[in-house]
Amino acid sequence: MWIQKEIRLKPKNRGFHLVTDEILSQLPELRAVKIGLLQVFIKHTSASLTINENADPTVRQDFESYFNRAVPENQPYYRHLDEGDDDMPAHLKSSILGCNLTIPVSNGRPNLGTWQGIYICEHRNHGGGRALLLTLNGE
């Protein structure tokens, strides 16, 4: 079975946000898959995806602090300035973290570790709703 659908996430503030449940609620077809793979692709260049700690919110705060320090705004070497001070750093952060995830599916659920969740990493101050393309393959 192959299923592909585009979903939209609610707008998020800048930062790292758990979206596992928001994604799963829009993919009820997953429950029918005994074994398979779910690919999650974000259709944007200033936000990204990652999998990490799903319990302690300070981890998400630390991610934001780290990336703001590693990829600062308002640098004199940035040439792409058309969309605001947060835009070029957002593109860099997105490239560092990546735009897609491949997640194993077992018995109708993503086979994530106990403490793992899917994050959307919103790198813009006002990014808006984000589109994800979900591709599910399995039996």
Image (cartoon, rainbow, N blue to C red):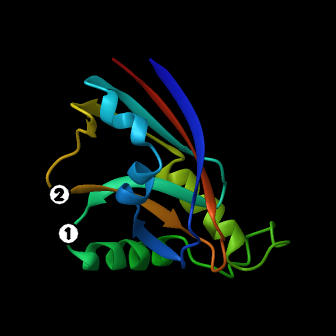
* Residue type at numbered disc 1: Ala
Q: Position of residue 133 (x, y in %)?
A: 58, 41
Q: Single out the residue that lies furthest toward the right.
A: 82
Observer-nearest of 43 and 36: 36
Find out whether the residues at labels 1 and 2 contact each other: C-beta distance under 8 Å.
yes
Q: CA distance from mark 1 to mark 2?
A: 6 Å
**Image side of residue 131 versus residue 101, left or right:** right
**Image side of residue 117 versus residue 49, left or right:** left
Q: Which residue is mark 1?
A: 55
Observer-nearest of 115 and 83: 115
Tell me which residue sits at (40%, 33%) in the image. 38
Q: Which mark is residue 71?
A: none
Observer-nearest of 115 and 70: 115
* Residue type at numbered disc 2: Trp
Q: Which residue is mark 2?
A: 115
Q: Position of residue 70 (x, y in %)?
A: 48, 71
| In the depicted structure, whether residue 7 falls above or below residue 52 | above
Tell me which residue sits at (33%, 17%) in the image. 139
**Image side of residue 30 versus residue 130, left or right:** left
Q: Position of residue 1 (x, y in %)?
A: 44, 17
Q: Secondary structure at mark 2?
A: loop
Q: Position of residue 54 (x, y in %)?
A: 24, 64
Mark 1 or mark 2, earlier in chain: 1
Give the image quarter of residue 81. Answer: bottom right
Q: Residues within 10 Å of mark 2 (few under 14, many from 20)?
A: few
Q: Residues within 10 Å of mark 1 (few under 14, many from 20)?
A: few
Give the image quarter of residue 57. Answer: bottom left
**Image side of residue 83 versus residue 89, left or right:** right
Q: Single out the residue that lies furthest toward the left.
A: 114
Observer-nearest of 85 and 26: 26
| In the depicted structure, whether residue 56 falls above or below residue 115 | below
